[in-house]
Amino acid sequence: MKRFLKDLSLTYAAGSLGALANTLAAWLFGVLGITAGLGVQSAPALTVGFLYPRLVWGGLWGFLFLLPFLRRSVVWRGIIYSLGPTAVQLLVVFPFKVGKGWLGLDLGTLTPLFVIFFNIVWGVCAAAWLQLASGEGPR
């Protein structure tokens, strides 16, 4: 039971840290005008209201790392696990929660690529931190 609680704590923390990296990347791309320069209308302000739910959901998505899949590859594990939140963002949140169209295309044609990229940032950062925090070190 003790090991299970430790694993839950580590995966939640990893997901939250990945979400922080994801959020800062999305914010920085907006501030630098990268998203706008490529025709995507996404420049989120770095506020508590924007950050807090992302950290919580990132932590919850971090529980995916409890699955015993691709433990030897930080990058591939992060990429594969990032597909879950990517699918939810593109297929549920954008069209139904915020009304930005299927795949968020109302924000710009390249929106899905940015979502994929930012979620890969989440996944790889979470996987790397989890591997480091669990004492396994890089492989």
Image (cartoon, grey):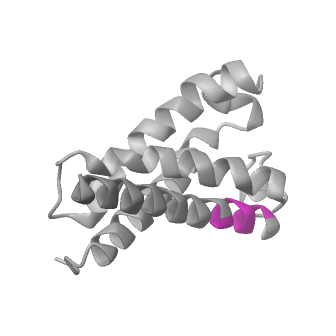
Q: Is residue 61 magenta?
A: no
User: On screen, 92 above or below 2?
Assistant: above
* In-front residue for pair 132/119: 132
Residue 112 visible? The answer is yes
Q: Residue at x 67, y 67 (%)?
A: 24
Q: Which residues are magenta?
A: 24-30
Q: What quarter of the picture does the C terminus occupy?
A: bottom left
Q: Tell me where residue 102 appears, x and y as whole percent.
A: 63, 21
User: On screen, 105 above or below 67?
Assistant: above
Q: Tell me where residue 60 appears, x and y as whole percent.
A: 49, 45
Q: Tell me where residue 72 appears, x and y as whole percent.
A: 14, 64
User: On screen, 91 above or below 136?
Assistant: above
* In-front residue for pair 100/105: 100
Q: Tell me where residue 70 appears, x and y as whole percent.
A: 17, 54
Q: Is residue 25 magenta?
A: yes
Q: Residue at x 38, y 63 (%)?
A: 10
* In-front residue for pair 104/34: 104
Check the image and name the residue furthest to the front.
Answer: 1
Q: Residue at x 23, y 59 (%)?
A: 3
Residue 74's image quarter? bottom left
Q: Residue at x 17, y 59 (%)?
A: 71
Residue 101 visible? The answer is no
Per the picture, the main secondary structure of the magenta-coloured stretch is helix
